[in-house]
Image (cartoon, rainbow, N blue to C red):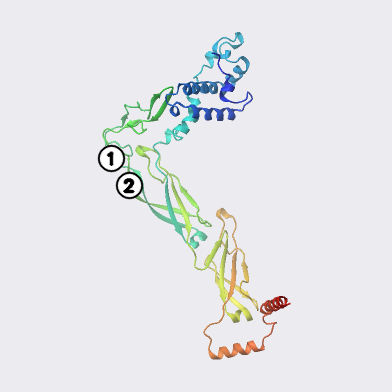
Amino acid sequence: MAKRCYYETLGVDRGAEPDQLKSAFRKLAMKYHPDRNPGDEDAEMRFKEINEAYDILKDDQRRAAYDQFGHAAFDGTGGAGARGFGQEFGFGSSFADVFDDLFSDFMGGGGRRGGQRNRGSDLRYNLEISLEDAHSGKKVDIHVPSSVACEACEGTGAAEGAEPTICPTCNGHGKVRSQQGFFTVERTCPTCQGQGRIIQDPCEICAGTGRVQKDRTLSINIPEGVEEGTRIRLAGEGEAGVRGGSPGDLYVFLSVAPHEIFQRDGMDLFCRVPISFTTAALGGQMEIPTLGGGRARISVPEGTQTGKQFRLKTKGMPGLRGQGKGDLYVQTIVETPVKLTRKQKELMKEFEATSDSKNNPQTAGFFSKVKQFWEELSD
């Protein structure tokens, strides 16, 4: 029976790009994989054809030979010009590479990461700081419970004088293979859990894990200008690796506590300041604090209304990595007097009797519009 064209087998055109070949192969290999079609001989045969086609076409030289001589380039029948390709590019010469990507899908993406197997876990630490600390920066000590290397066995997991031995199940490879029909499946060794070595005489302190629990105190430098959600990475300060593996990292996530006076928006600060009725009417001075610990004096003009905003340049938050400074915006709130004495009430009534629309332009303007609105409704 004549072989099918490799391009037809993968369902692609002859001018298909490498990414198209790879995508077609992955899709078909997943569909006809023996594990998904147990006992189906047709699916197994189709799976073999798909792998053979991709093994040839993924290599530029073999693909060029196939495009010129067809299948004859690999079975020795293509004449002098095609001799030798069958031996040089025989099917299976890079068989493991054909399944690398496929393994990552079936086996959870761990195909080539064995070197990271013993690495310790990363840790997260949530730290709340004040707005003052975010403004000026601070050095903070934190206490972190985590795993550290066992001092008794120096992280090996073996008792004093003992050494880990090669795992007899996997011969030190950390993986075992099993045949499932046409396909060979590689799994983590169940005996050594992928370590390649076993501890026959474990350390009594760490029970053979090479690490113990311990509270550590670490110092963190919080730079000025940090924002809510800023993440600080401390490399190698996570959990210790198993049996001498490299440690993980510690990630410190910062949150900024609400402030009683200031609200933050990026690099700018906002502050709402109540002023008395008389100060708003007659004008005056008010003194407010700045987040850096200083003071700022603001001149309030006559007739200041609620919502009037004053801008103090460079009195806001500093930017990270020296990106300048924001501004401080002060917004006034005119406070209505309460609990007036009889004398004060009399003075207020006297003021009301002598005032006109010029003293209260916004009030006069609003009720003028209301009067016009009612007149239009009555027409």
Residue for badge 1: 207
Q: Residue at x 42, y 26 (%)?
A: 38
Q: CA distance from mark 1 to mark 2?
A: 12 Å
- 142 above or below 262? above
Q: Amino acid at mark 2?
A: Gln
Q: Name which of mark 1 and mark 2 comes first in the sequence.
A: 1
Image x and y of residue 66, in percent? 59, 17
**Residue 157, located in which quarter of the rendered image?**
top left
Instruction: Give the residue at mark 2.
Output: 213
Q: Quadrant of residue 155?
A: top left
Q: Position of residue 115 (x, y in %)?
A: 42, 34
| Mark 2 Cα-neighbour bin, 10 Å: few <14, some 14–19, many ≥20 | some
Residue located at (32% from left, 47% from top): 213
Badge 1: residue crowd in 10 Å (few <14, some 14–19, many ≥20): some
Q: Secondary structure at mark 2?
A: strand
Q: Amino acid at mark 1?
A: Ala
Is 373 in front, or is 278? Answer: 373
The answer to whether residue 84 is left or right of residue 211 is: right
Q: Is residue 90 above or below residue 159?
A: above
How many numbered marks appear? Answer: 2
Labelled disc at residue 30: none
Helix, strand or loop status at disc 1: loop
The residue nearer to you, when weighing 11 against 71, is 11
Residue at the limit of the structure toward the right, as seen here: 379
Residue 231 coordinates in the image, percent (x, y): 49, 51
* Residue drawn at the location 39% of the way across and 30% of the way down: 187
